[in-house]
Image (cartoon, rainbow, N blue to C red):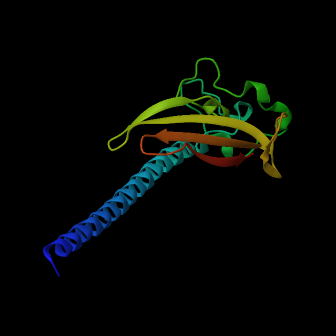
């Protein structure tokens, strides 16, 4: 073999090594991107679950929310049982699902006060975490079906987005009266 063919083999080996190095680098970057997206989704899921836990601690509707006591107390959570004769006909109409006048987050007293809530939280890794909430009446037998009448079921959709995610995460939970 002459010097020319050894040079050709060396150039070919370097080209193969370069292709291999690029493939390994691409795989590492892809893995890191997937890991970052997974971490962002977990952070978003934690934010959504925090909001849903807050919602779960509230009364189903203003009609059954505890009234403040005359001494300035906060009353007792009414989710433990319905008052006699109170049902969907007494609940907030679907078009009025939102916080009542004078109520501000986090001092809500019923589930539908969260409808329209938009807030930004800070995450040490991902920065701003955008959270928004929608509340709907749904058919108790088919929670995918939004109802235009008051029912005994409300669906809460929490939407969360942060840097590092490809799309908005939506977590749904249905609360029954």
Does residue 116 appear to the left or right of 151 in the view shown? left
Q: Measured along the vertical axis of the image, is residue 12 above or below residue 80?
A: below
- Give left or right: position of 96 versus 70: right
**Which of 93/80 is in front?**
93
* Left-right relation of 46 to 115: left
The image quadrant where one finds the C terminus is top right
Give the residue furthest to the top.
101
Q: Residue 149, located in which quarter of the rendered image?
A: top right
**Residue at 24%, 71% in the rendered image:** 13
Q: Nearer the viewer, residue 3 or 119?
A: 3
Residue 15 vertical position relative to residue 151 in the rendered view, above or below: below
Q: Looking at the image, is 150 positioned above or below residue 28?
A: above
Q: How many marks?
A: 0
Q: Residue furthest bottom?
A: 1
State the residue lying farthest toward the left: 3
Is residue 106 something that shows in the picture?
no
Is 26 placed left or right of 55 in the picture?
left
- Residue 104 visible within the image: yes
The front one of 73 and 61 is 61
Q: Position of residue 126 (x, y in %)?
A: 37, 42
Name which residue lies at 63% across and 17% down: 101
- In the picture, residue 32 is in which quadrant? bottom left
- Quadrant where the N terminus sits is bottom left
Find residue 142 and report its horizontal and vertical position in percent: 81, 51
- Where residue 129 appears, as percent x and y from the top left, is 44, 37
Residue 118 at what x, y percent from top left? Answer: 54, 29
Who's the residue at 86% across and 33% down the image? Answer: 89
């Amino acid at each position: 073999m002459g010097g020319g063919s050894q040079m050709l083999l060396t150039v070919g080996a370097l080209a193969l090594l370069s292709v291999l190095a690029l493939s390994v680098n691409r795989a590492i970057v892809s893995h890191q991107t997937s890991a970052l997206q997974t971490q962002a989704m977990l952070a978003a899921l934690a934010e959504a679950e925090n909001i849903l836990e807050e919602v779960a601690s509230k009364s189903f509707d203003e009609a059954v929310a505890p009234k403040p006591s005359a001494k300035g107390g906060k009353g007792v959570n009414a989710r433990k049982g319905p008052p006699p004769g109170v049902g969907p006909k007494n609940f907030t109409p679907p078009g009025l699902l939102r916080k009542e006048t004078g109520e501000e987050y986090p001092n809500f007293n019923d589930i539908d006060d969260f409808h329209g809530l938009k807030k930004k939280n800070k995450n040490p890794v991902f920065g701003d975490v955008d959270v928004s909430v929608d509340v709907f009446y749904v058919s108790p037998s088919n929670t995918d079906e939004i109802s235009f009448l008051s029912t005994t079921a409300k669906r809460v959709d929490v939407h969360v987005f942060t840097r590092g995610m490809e799309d908005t995460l939506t977590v749904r939970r249905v609360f029954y009266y």
